[in-house]
């Protein structure tokens, strides 16, 4: 039995308010998902859950299948094999209900650079059917929270990379989702901006009870209390609390555990310690 | 024994949510258009060049006999005005599809597609938004053309509106259908050569079909089968408060077919994935 198998078996997560006999409701359930681009298999039988109010890091090198998985969860790709549910709503059968509960920050920037911060937020709100009046209130609120209220009327083009990412996260939360996906959200940012964004997202988990799936290839973004999913060449190699993944790999840290699991020499340009 | 619970989420969407979504998409498209002043200017310059230069040059060469909906001899400029209005919509429809390809490559399209509302509805809203933008351009063109003696009856400015909406939808849906089959932004240049120019020139936009028939019967039949011809004629008749039912039926039918085709063909995964084994985004 591999670490993966053992961890999958232990992935029951408590519901926020379970009834008698009720088991588990995952914020995100990835059930035996496989995906191919023609003959190339991008995901092979990937199977894990993300609990509500938890931070799950999806760790893998470029090409591991992280973005493919995100595209499947967000219904940008059709699911070829397996099942994906968001708080119990099957993304294939009831996509509207599932996507209502989902906020996404994609790896490429998806803001409209020629529109203002507020206009970008209002557009997103409209796509979720939120009335203009309510959207204005929420926009002002989130801009205040991310300390960009004074830039509300500025064009997004004039923001720094870190500010754009904060705005994208704020936008993803505008319709008050319960699950947030972030695909390499800190790529291209300096150290401080990365730390700020990571802190902000972790606060969302603890303060608002949002389930987070954070795709990354950077070890230093992973904390000991996080859940960890290791994805390599489309296969899920491990899943569970970071400490357990490290222990089961017989390693001292995430870096070494990852290298042992994947058989790779380095990750993200970092030499093995 | 355990059971799986499902977090309740409202099923379906209210009418107001659909309307808010439509408004938002139209509003964003209009804002983008107004911010791109070059696009607005070039959208106007193109037909005006045809009107001021081409039509002036050909006025003496191409005589127009009295044909419906006109009740008297008309200047060539008057004849081609509806064709130029349709041309604005043709270019706008293709430009909208260009923006969809661009949005898809740059990632902006993802924002639209992860909306919980039905995808077919989102694409329809995008189509309506593009049509609304084309109306701004067409009426700006008509305002300038008025000073060039293109003066349809006042009521014509109103009666042409539904025709413009329908033709705008048809041409936008065609653009959307084409954008679904374009893999990369660079391929869009081919659309100019293989779609826009043939559609425009093999139509009644620049010369009446009876003249085409005299010159080339084959081209005449091609023009007859060209939906753009019917968009031009629908606009032409509507601009003079009249109705061309055949063109209405053709444009309406083509709109439905192109729209259904676009919704079915629009694969959102295109452009999100770099092609080739090992080269895939992952």
Image: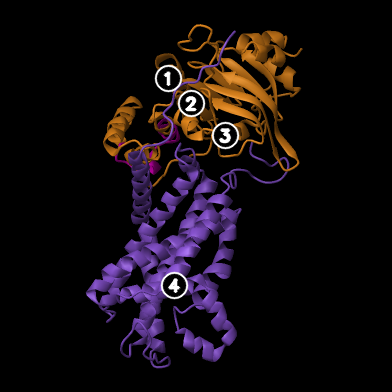
Query: Can you say whether A51 is above or below B233 in the image?
Result: above
As drawn, which residue projects farthest toward the left? B154
The chain whose colour is orange is A
The residue identified by callout 2 is A180
Badge 4 marks a residue whose secondary structure is: helix
- Dot 1: chain letter: A
Q: Position of residue B55 (x, y in %)?
A: 39, 84
How far is mark 1 from mark 4, CA to CA?
57 Å
Q: Quadrant of residue A213?
A: top right
- Circle number at residue B247: 4
Q: Quadrant of residue A239?
A: top right
How far is mark 1 from mark 3, CA to CA?
27 Å
Palette colour of chain B: purple
- Circle number at residue A92: 3
For the question of whether residue B182 can be seen, the reply is no
**Disc 2 + disc 1, Cβ < 8 Å:** yes
The residue identified by callout 1 is A204
Residue visible at 56% across and 60% down? B188
Quadrant including the C terminus of chain B: top right
Nearer the viewer's eye, disc 3 or disc 4? 4
């Amino acid at each position: 039995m591999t670490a993966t198998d053992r961890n999958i078996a232990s992935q029951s997560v408590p519901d926020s308010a379970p009834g008698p006999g009720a088991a588990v409701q995952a914020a995100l359930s990835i059930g035996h998902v496989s995906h191919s681009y023609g003959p190339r298999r991008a995901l092979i039988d990937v199977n894990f859950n993300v609990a509500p109010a938890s931070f799950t890091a999806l760790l893998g090198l470029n090409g591991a299948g992280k973005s493919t998985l995100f595209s499947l969860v967000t219904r940008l790709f059709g699911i070829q094999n397996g099942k994906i549910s968001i708080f119990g709503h099957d993304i294939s059968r009831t996509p509207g209900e599932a996507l209502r509960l989902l906020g996404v920050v994609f790896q490429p920037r998806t803001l409209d650079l020629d529109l203002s911060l507020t206009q970008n937020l209002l557009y997103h709100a409209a796509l979720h059917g939120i009335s203009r009046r309510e959207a204005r209130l929420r926009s002002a609120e989130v801009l205040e929270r991310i300390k960009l209220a004074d830039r509300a009327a500025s064009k997004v083009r004039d923001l720094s990379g870190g500010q754009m990412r904060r705005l994208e996260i704020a936008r993803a939360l505008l319709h008050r989702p319960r699950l947030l996906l972030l695909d390499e959200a800190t790529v291209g940012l300096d150290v401080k901006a990365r730390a700020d964004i990571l802190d902000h997202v972790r606060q969302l988990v603890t303060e608002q009870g949002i389930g987070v799936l954070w795709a990354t290839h950077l070890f230093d973004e992973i904390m000991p209390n996080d859940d960890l999913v290791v994805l390599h060449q489309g296969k899920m190699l491990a899943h569970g609390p970071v400490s357990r993944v490290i222990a089961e790999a017989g390693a001292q840290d995430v870096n070494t555990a990852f290298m042992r699991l994947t058989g790779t020499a380095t990750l993200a340009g970092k030499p093995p310690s | 024994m355990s059971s799986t619970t499902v977090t309740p989420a409202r099923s379906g969407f209210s009418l107001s949510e659909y309307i808010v979504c439509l408004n938002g998409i139209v509003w964003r498209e209009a804002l983008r258009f107004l911010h791109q002043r070059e696009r607005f200017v070039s959208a106007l310059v193109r037909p005006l060049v045809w009107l001021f230069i081409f039509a002036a040059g050909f006025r003496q060469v191409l005589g127009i006999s009295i044909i419906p909906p006109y009740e008297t001899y008309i200047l060539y400029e008057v004849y081609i005005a509806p064709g130029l209005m349709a041309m604005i919509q043709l270019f706008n429809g293709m430009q909208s599809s260009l923006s969809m390809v661009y949005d898809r490559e740059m990632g902006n399209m993802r924002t639209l597609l992860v909306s919980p509302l039905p995808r077919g509805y989102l694409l329809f809203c995008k189509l309506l938004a593009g049509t609304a933008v084309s109306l701004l351009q067409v009426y700006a063109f008509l305002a300038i053309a008025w000073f060039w003696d293109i003066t349809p009856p006042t009521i014509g400015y109103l009666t042409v509106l539904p025709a413009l909406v329908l033709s705008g939808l048809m041409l936008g849906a065609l653009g959307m259908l084409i954008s679904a089959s374009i893999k990369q932004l660079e391929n869009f240049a081919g659309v100019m050569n293989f779609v826009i120019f043939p559609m425009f020139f093999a139509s009644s936009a620049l010369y009446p079909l009876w003249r085409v028939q005299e010159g080339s019967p084959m081209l005449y039949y091609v023009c007859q089968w060209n939906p753009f011809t019917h968009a031009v004629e629908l606009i032409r008749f509507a601009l003079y408060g009249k109705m061309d039912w055949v063109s209405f039926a053709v444009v309406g039918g083509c709109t439905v077919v192109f729209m259904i085709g676009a919704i079915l063909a629009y694969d959102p995964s295109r452009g999100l994935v770099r092609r080739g084994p090992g080269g895939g985004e992952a």
